[in-house]
Every structure is written in structure tokens, then in C-alpha cells.
């Protein structure tokens, strides 16, 4: 049987068998394997990055782990301001008892009920806040205090009152024994006439 005709006997072979034996060309098994390696490598990197972001979020209160679920210990926003700031930060609140209180952008650390909260700066001993009624208002618009929750910011107007005995505080406001003891040690709490949620 005659061999294929070549235009140039000294030139490269153009035998159709070359593609099958050389491994060259887009349809070769090696090329297909490389495409799959890149495809799966890309998605493995994306998956690993998503897991890393989630782990970081669980540890730091960020990332997709806390999307839509703010971490109360990581409340961010404008700095607290107002004439009540000194009383809010004071470990001993007795010198402020009877004085008017007003502060803006106060973080809520814990919600005990619709009218009782622990508030104050991050990583600071919280101050007890008691709202006299179940609604808060701003600009004549009533807002239910149920909008106030751990992780939110509120503006507060009221007075600093003397702390009751721990047993009374536990019974009246459903505080834990530790919270009631802390309240007695501070000597005062905030009784709010107005406390409204600050949208962010």
C-alpha cells in the first residue's frame, strides 16, 4: 500500500496519525485534564475564601456570619455624646443621683425586657436603663420600645436615680443576681422619660 504523498520529503510529516500519537491539539487528554484542574482549582479557592471569611466573622463579629445579625459586643456608630456621658461612664453614679441625664448614640448591650436594658460603651461595665413607659417618641412620632434591642443605638433623656436594694431590683426588673449586685455597687441607674431607637 502506497504511503501518503508528501509535498516536501524533507519537511514535517502531515500524517493524520500524528494527532493520535503526539498528544498535541485541543482535543488531547492532557489538555482536557488541565482544563478540569483549573476549573476545580478555581472553585476550591473560592470555597476556601468563603469558609475563611465565615470563620473570621464568627471570631470578630464580621463577615457573612453576621450579615443581618449585628453582634452586640461589636456595636459601631457615631461616638456617644451629650451631658450625660460622664454619668454613663462613671463607675460610681451616686454623685449624679437626682441630676438630669441626656446622651445620644448610646449602645444597647443587653435587652432584659421592653422597658429594661443594660447600656453603655463597648467593653465597659453597663449601666441599667429603665424606660418609664413602653413607647418612645421623636418628632411626635411614637415608636415602640420593642424596636430597641441588643446591638442598636438609642438616644436617652431622663434622670439618674438611686439604686434600690438588690432583692428589689431582681424582683422588679428581673435582673440576675450578678446584675443586681452590680447595680447596687454603681449606686445609680438611668430612668428614661424618652428613649428612642436611632436608625443606622
Image (cartoon, helix red, strand yellow):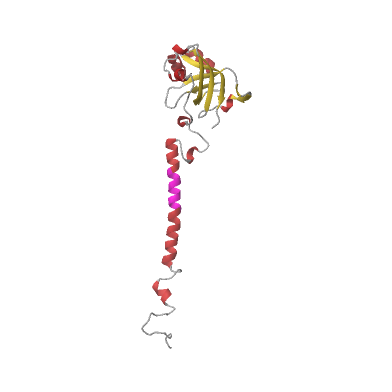
Q: Residue furthest left?
A: 10
Front-most of 157 and 166?
A: 157
- Residue at 43%, 67% (x, y): give it: 29
Q: What residue span does the magenta drawing correspond to? A: 43-52
Q: Is residue 82 visible?
A: yes
Left or right: 8 as drawn, with respect to 144: left
Q: Residue at x 46, y 40 (%)?
A: 63
Residue 28: x, y in percent? 43, 69
Viewer-closest of 61 and 78: 78
| Residue 171 % position (x, y) | 52, 15
Tell me what residue is drawn at x 45 percent, y 31 percent: 74
Total numbered circles: 0
41 relative position to 193: left or right: left
Q: Is residue 95 magenta?
A: no
Q: Quadrant of residue 131?
A: top right
Q: Residue at x 43, y 40 (%)?
A: 55
Q: Residue most toward the bottom?
A: 1
Residue 44 within the segment the image draws in magenta:
yes
- 111 or 129, which is in the foreground? 129
Quadrant in which the C terminus appears? top right
Task: Provide the major secondary structure of the magenta segment.
Answer: helix
- Residue 101 x/y as whole percent: 51, 17
2 versus 31 height, above or below: below
Residue 195 location, x and y as percent? 56, 22
Q: Which quadrant is home to the N terminus?
A: bottom left
Q: Is residue 41 above or below residue 126?
A: below
The front one of 13 and 40 is 13
Q: Is residue 174 visible?
A: no
Amino acid at each position: 500500500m502506497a504511503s501518503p504523498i508528501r509535498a516536501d520529503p524533507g519537511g514535517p510529516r502531515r500524517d493524520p496519525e500524528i494527532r493520535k500519537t503526539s498528544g498535541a491539539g485541543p482535543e488531547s487528554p492532557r489538555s482536557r485534564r488541565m482544563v478540569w484542574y483549573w476549573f476545580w482549582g478555581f472553585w476550591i479557592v473560592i470555597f476556601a475564601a468563603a469558609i475563611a471569611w465565615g470563620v473570621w466573622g464568627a471570631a470578630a463579629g464580621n463577615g457573612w456570619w453576621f450579615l443581618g445579625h449585628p453582634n452586640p459586643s461589636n456595636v459601631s456608630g457615631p461616638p456617644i455624646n451629650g451631658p450625660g456621658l460622664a454619668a454613663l461612664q462613671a463607675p460610681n453614679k451616686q454623685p449624679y443621683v437626682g441630676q438630669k441625664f441626656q446622651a445620644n448614640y448610646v449602645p444597647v448591650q443587653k435587652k432584659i425586657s421592653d422597658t429594661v436594658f443594660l447600656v453603655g460603651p463597648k467593653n465597659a461595665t453597663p449601666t441599667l436603663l429603665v424606660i418609664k413607659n413602653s413607647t418612645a417618641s421623636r418628632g411626635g412620632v411614637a415608636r415602640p420600645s420593642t424596636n430597641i434591642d441588643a446591638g442598636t443605638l438609642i438616644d436617652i433623656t431622663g434622670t439618674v436615680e438611686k439604686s434600690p436594694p438588690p432583692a428589689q431590683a431582681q424582683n422588679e426588673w428581673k435582673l440576675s443576681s450578678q446584675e443586681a449586685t452590680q447595680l447596687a455597687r454603681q449606686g445609680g441607674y438611668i430612668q428614661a422619660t424618652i428613649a428612642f431607637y436611632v436608625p443606622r
